């Protein structure tokens, strides 16, 4: 009962504060392995049910294009940075991701405050000095989410990645238990996009954690999760870009593929927070993960060195323990 009350209070507080707190809540709500269930359930609502900005306050941001019609003023989803509306462009159904007017100021103010706190903590408690480096990296990447031109470029890279994973529309992948699946990402539409509005092709599906629907379709949760893992492994280990915000609100599933009603199609949404790694860094990351899986301490040290970190001999055991946990 105490957890239920505290979780509800936390949800209401974060919904009021918005900004970076909403991003933090999205991450926390995706960690059911360490968070009590009431917190996960309450904070999950902030993944796509955050406070909505009235349409009359943001419609001026949308480019006035004659072929853009039937814009639904009620958003189908709303998160920390933007909300999503359906519309039609040249007769085809599309989505418009429109930035909240308050998003930039709130996010930048929160990041500045957290950077200041991390600096102070690093001085008072030297063992936590690493927090500043983490916050600097996060701030550098998180602010890119405010520029939808950057997200459009990320989507174009992701579309190219899809051609490596699935060269043809009828190319099927398979989960470890033999279920066929495909992966898709939305296509950006440049004619009706700018740095505050991103237009994309509409993708059908339900959230990946809509378990009742998966059961209705005869899909096992383990099969879908295996498809998700294969998808992100391909992005992170072999691709030029990977999605850095994989909470359940950004992963859609629909029954069937382009060639059959069997299996499923996975859609990866929201490419505002995406990361490109140099080949050497990506190889080092692969080494770290493989070393953790095989208990190879020498390879772990090589991997850390490749990504710019150096482990002392007396830290090797602790480093292995942490990597296996992650």
Image (tube, rainbow, N blue to C red):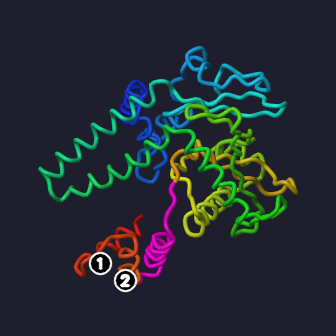
- Residue 294 highlighted magenta (yes or no): yes
In the rendered structure, which disc, 1 or 2, sits on the residue that comes first in sequence? 2
Residue 204's spot in the image, x, y percent?
Answer: 75, 41
**Which contiguous range is marked in magenta?**
275-297
Report the predominant secondary structure element of the magenta stretch.
helix
Figure quadrant of residue 207: top right
Q: Image height check: is 167 above or below 212?
A: below
Q: Image height check: is 138 above or below 283?
A: above
Q: Image height check: is 194 above or below 131?
A: above
How packed mark 2 is, by other alpha carbons closer than 10 Å (few <14, some 14-19, many 20 or more), is some
Q: Nearer the viewer, residue 7 or 112?
A: 112
Provide the secondary structure element on which disc 2 rests: helix
Residue 137, which numbered label?
Answer: none
Q: Which residue is mark 2?
A: 297
Q: Is residue 160 left or right of residue 308?
A: right
From the image, which quarter does the C terminus lie in?
bottom left
Provide the secondary structure element on which disc 1 rests: helix
Q: In percent of the image, x 78 and y 62: which residue is there?
A: 180
Toward the left, the furthest residue is: 124
Verify CB contact (< 8 Å) between mark 1 and mark 2: yes
From the image, which quarter does the N terminus lie in?
top left
Toward the top, the furthest residue is: 56
Residue 75's spot in the image, x, y percent?
Answer: 64, 25
Q: In percent of the image, x 39 and y 29: which residue is there?
A: 105
Residue 316, which numbered label?
Answer: 1
Q: Nearer the viewer, residue 260 or 168?
A: 168
- Residue 93 highlighted magenta (yes or no): no
Figure quadrant of residue 54: top right
Q: In percent of the image, x 63 and y 55: which residue is there?
A: 157
């Amino acid at each position: 009962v105490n957890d239920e009350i505290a979780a509800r209070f936390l949800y209401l507080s974060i919904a009021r504060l918005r900004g970076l707190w909403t991003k933090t809540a999205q991450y926390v709500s995706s960690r059911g392995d360490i968070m009590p269930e009431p917190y996960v359930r309450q904070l999950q609502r902030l993944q796509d049910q955050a406070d909505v900005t009235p349409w009359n306050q943001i419609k001026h941001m949308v480019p006035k294009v004659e072929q853009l019609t039937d814009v639904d003023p009620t958003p189908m989803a709303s998160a920390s940075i933007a909300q999503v509306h359906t519309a039609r462009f040249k007769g085809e159904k599309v989505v418009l991701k429109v930035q909240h007017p308050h998003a930039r100021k709130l996010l930048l103010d929160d990041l500045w405050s957290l950077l200041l706190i991390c600096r102070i903590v690093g001085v008072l408690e030297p063992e936590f000095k690493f927090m500043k480096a983490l916050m600097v990296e996060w701030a550098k990447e998180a602010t890119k989410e405010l520029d939808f031109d950057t997200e459009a470029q990320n989507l174009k890279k992701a579309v190219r990645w899809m051609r490596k994973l699935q060269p043809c529309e009828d190319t099927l992948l398979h989960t470890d238990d033999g279920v066929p699946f495909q992966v898709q990402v939305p296509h950006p539409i440049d004619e009706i996009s700018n740095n505050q509005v991103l237009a994309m092709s509409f993708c059908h599906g339900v959230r990946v954690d809509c378990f009742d629907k998966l059961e209705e379709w005869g899909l096992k949760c383990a099969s879908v999760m295996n498809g998700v893992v294969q998808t992100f492994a391909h992005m992170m280990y072999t691709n030029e870009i990977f999605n850095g915000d994989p909470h359940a609100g950004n992963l859609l599933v629909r029954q069937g593929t382009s060639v059959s009603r069997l299996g499923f199609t996975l859609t990866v949404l929201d490419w505002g927070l995406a990361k490109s790694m140099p080949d050497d860094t990506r190889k080092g990351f692969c080494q770290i993960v493989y070393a953790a899986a095989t208990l190879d301490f020498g390879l772990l040290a090589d991997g850390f060195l490749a990504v710019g970190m150096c482990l002392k001999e007396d830290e090797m055991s602790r480093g292995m323990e942490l990597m296996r946990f992650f």
